[in-house]
Amino acid sequence: MIFSSIKNYQTLLNYFDKRSTNTCTESLNTLIKTFRSQFRGDRNIDFFLI
């Protein structure tokens, strides 16, 4: 518990210092997962590489 708190200390301070979070990255990850789930079963790999 204490080790994880110390490990996340810089991340917590970064939010208060620069008002920066990883919400944009998490949002993009969710969009990619949603896109992939909609086209599950599509065998055309080139479609995903564009």
Image (tube, grey):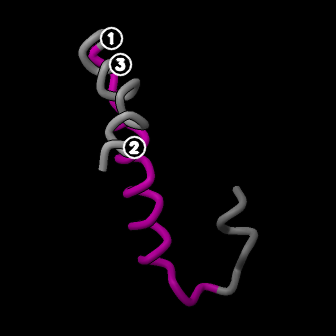
Q: Nearer the viewer, residue 38 or 25?
A: 25
Q: Is residue 27 left or right of residue 50?
A: left
Q: Nearer the viewer, residue 24 or 35?
A: 24
| Distance (Cα) linking label 1 and label 3 | 6 Å
Amino acid type at mark 3: Asn
Look at the picture and state if 3 lies above or below 17. below
Tell which residue pokes out farthest to the right in this image.
Answer: 46
Amino acid type at mark 2: Phe
| Distance (Cα) linking label 2 and label 1 | 24 Å
| Number of the label disc, if any, that sits on residue 28 | none
Q: Earlier in the sequence, mark 2 or mark 3?
A: 2
Amino acid type at mark 1: Lys
Which mark lies nearer to you, 2 or 1?
Answer: 2
Q: For the point 38% across and 47% down, which residue is it? A: 26
Q: Secondary structure at mark 2?
A: helix
| Distance (Cα) linking label 2 and label 3 | 18 Å
Tell which residue pokes out farthest to the top in this image.
Answer: 17
Look at the picture and state if 18 lies above or below 38. above
Magenta residues, start to end: 19-42
| In magenta segment, residue 15 | no
Q: Residue 31, percent across and down? A: 39, 56
Q: For the point 32% across and 43% down, which residue is it? A: 2
Q: For the point 70% across and 80% down, which residue is it? A: 44
Q: Which residue is mark 1?
A: 18
Q: Residue 10, percent across and down? A: 40, 24
Q: Earlier in the sequence, mark 2 or mark 1?
A: 2
Q: Which residue is mark 3?
A: 14
Q: Nearer the viewer, residue 18 or 23?
A: 18
